[in-house]
Amino acid sequence: MIGYVSGTVVYSDSQKSVILTASGVGYEVHTSTPMVPNRDIALFISHIIREQSQDLYGFETADDKKFFEMLLDVNGIGPKSAFGLVTHLGVQQIISAITFENVDVLKSAPGVGKKSAEQIVLSLKDKVTKLEMGFAVKENPIKSGVKTKSENIVDAFLVKETLAACQGLGFKDQDVLPMIQRHLQEGLVQKPEELVKLILKELR
């Protein structure tokens, strides 16, 4: 099984990239965005083997790959839908949507309908609540790492209260969640009202 590919991009479009390794082998990998040709790149790979085909899905972090493979365990979710969820929404936003049973956020990913979104929540809610692992924060890697259980509880409370307040003001969860997660990653807010004020500044 291929788990990691490092090399130079020799071709890329909106769906796949060909990565030439130092050994002279070129791997065709599903990627979320076009890659710049002649640039070096390294990706974690989920190697999907079927009877008539083999596909490689590329991710910037091992945690993205791990969550992609967790989504594949959900009944009715195939590689394309799982890849669309991870690359379109991001792991943190998916976790928040599952935790608070926000089907609309999951539906915003390409190829995911209402029934699939509901199945994701049903299948993964218990697993997600038990995840005590730090998903890599690309914007600020110094702060990435495993959060304590108490920190996760505080974050969950802040997200829930802030979403409720924003819903009352007429804003959609899928518009607000990315802002909430960004501010939580920065670690500058302690209360829901502080978070709401920051979000309102961005939305108005």
Image (spheres, grey):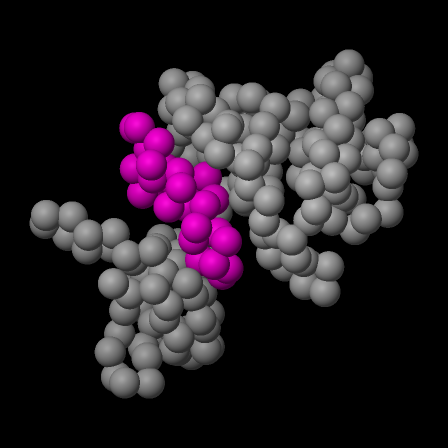
Residue placed at 86% from the left, 41% from the top?
A: 189
Of 105 and 161, which appears nearest the observer?
161
Q: Is residue 137 visible?
A: no
Magenta highlight on residue 70: yes
Image coordinates of residue 116 in percent, x first then y, are 38, 24
In the displayed structure, would residue 44 be above or below residue 156? below
Looking at the rendered image, the quarter that the C terminus falls into is top right
Looking at the rendered image, the quarter that the N terminus falls into is bottom left
Q: Quadrant of residue 140?
A: bottom right
Q: Quadrant of residue 56?
A: bottom left
Magenta highlight on residue 13: no
Residue placed at 54% from the left, 28% from the top?
A: 98
Q: Is residue 45 left or right of residue 121?
A: left
In the displayed structure, would residue 17 be above or below residue 53? below
Image coordinates of residue 100 in percent, x first then y, are 61, 24
In the displayed structure, would residue 61 be above or below residue 81? below
Q: Is residue 112 left or right of residue 51?
A: right
The magenta segment: 59-86
Image coordinates of residue 183 in percent, x first then y, are 78, 44
Q: Is residue 19 visible?
A: yes
